[in-house]
Image: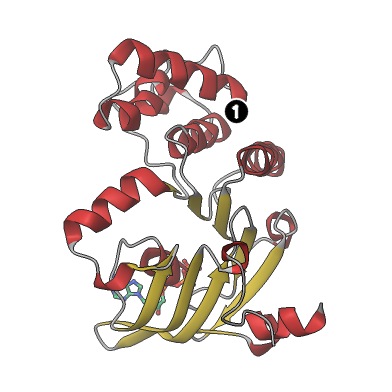
Amino acid sequence: MSNGDDSPDSTVPLLAARDLAKAHGRTEALRGASVELAAGEILAVTGPSGSGKSTLLHCLAGIVRPDAGSVSYAGERLDALPEKRLSELRRTEFGVVFQFGQLIPELTALDNVALPLMLAGTSRPDAHARAGEWLERFGVRGQEALRPGEMSGGQAQRTSLARALVTGPRIVFADEPTGALDSLATEQVMTALTHTARETDTAVLLITHDAQVAAYADREVRLSDGTVAPEFSTEATEAAV
Ligand SMILES: Nc1ncnc2c1ncn2[C@@H]1O[C@H](COP(=O)(O)OP(=O)(O)OP(=O)(O)O)[C@@H](O)[C@H]1O
């Protein structure tokens, strides 16, 4: 079978979750979910409302600890890491985009994108210069001075993507990034995200309920009642190759 012990490092998944379980009170959001993400891969996670997609993303991104199962990032067990190391990993290796962007409302687009760099110790002029380049890359050049409330939904999401990617993460976690956008803005956001991810070899884990959005991904896994539907398991994909 594939993925034997003699596999070179390039075949080891960048991120691997095994048998994840997570309950919110009495609700079992995840019940033995396993998923893998390869370096540079764009993976869509789909499934009905309440099937556990966001909970899975939170566990994979180290935002929430699973009750059982493991999450490994580049061979390191995330679920067992102390909080300090986990937050360092989140800051340096991961970028996150949510449905409503979660930009800081008081800051301009330029300052929002520059912020992660400044938090990592980059000087303000350098951070601003790089933030400007990333805004340009995402087609929001000229909007630097706008605050989130002054932008369209699509501009705000493209600014959020610039903020998620400005630090050069290896994985971007995107939870319904186009959920609040019309179809034109969706297309612009998805094109910008997937082009940039491919150019920079950044992996993307994308949650969506929209088949048109899932079609931008290399692969899809579907969650159902907190587990990955069998036809979307890693084994099924490998067997089909
Ligand atoms: N913080 C919470 N407290 C209580 N229950 C929660 C919490 N977060 C999620 N749940 C429950 O866990 C289950 C899975 O939720 P989750 O948000 O992961 O699903 P989802 O597939 O992302 O749903 P949606 O597509 O509607 O966003 C649902 O039944 C939800 O109501």
Q: Judging from the image, what secondary structure is the residue with disc 1 in?
A: loop
Q: Is residue 158 above or below residue 114?
A: below
Image spot of residue 207 (x, y percent): 55, 61
Of 210 and 88, which appears nearest the observer? 88
Identify the image quadrant of residue 57. bottom left
**Which residue sits at x=51%, y=37%?**
161
Question: Residue type at mark 1?
Answer: Phe
Q: Is residue 3 left or right of residue 133?
A: right
Residue 52 visible to the viewer = no
- Identified at 36% across, 87% down, the residue is 28
Residue drawn 56% across and 64% down?
Answer: 9
Q: From this viewpoint, which residue is outermost toward the right?
A: 241
From the top left corner, tell me how far across and down residue 22 is, in percent. 33, 81
From the viewer's perspective, is 83 left or right of 230?
left
Residue 232 sits above or below residue 116 on the image: below
At a point 29% along the width and 67% down the height, the residue shown is: 64
In the rendered image, the quadrant that contains the N terminus is bottom right
The C terminus is located in which quarter?
A: bottom right
Q: Nearer the viewer, residue 25 or 18?
A: 18
Q: Position of residue 53 (x, y in %)?
A: 49, 70
- Ligand 1 placement by image quarter: bottom left
Is there any visible trace of residue 198 in the rendered image?
yes
Quickly name the residue at label 1.
138
Q: Residue at the front extreme? A: 6
**Along the line of sight, the residue nearer the viewer: 241 or 231:** 241
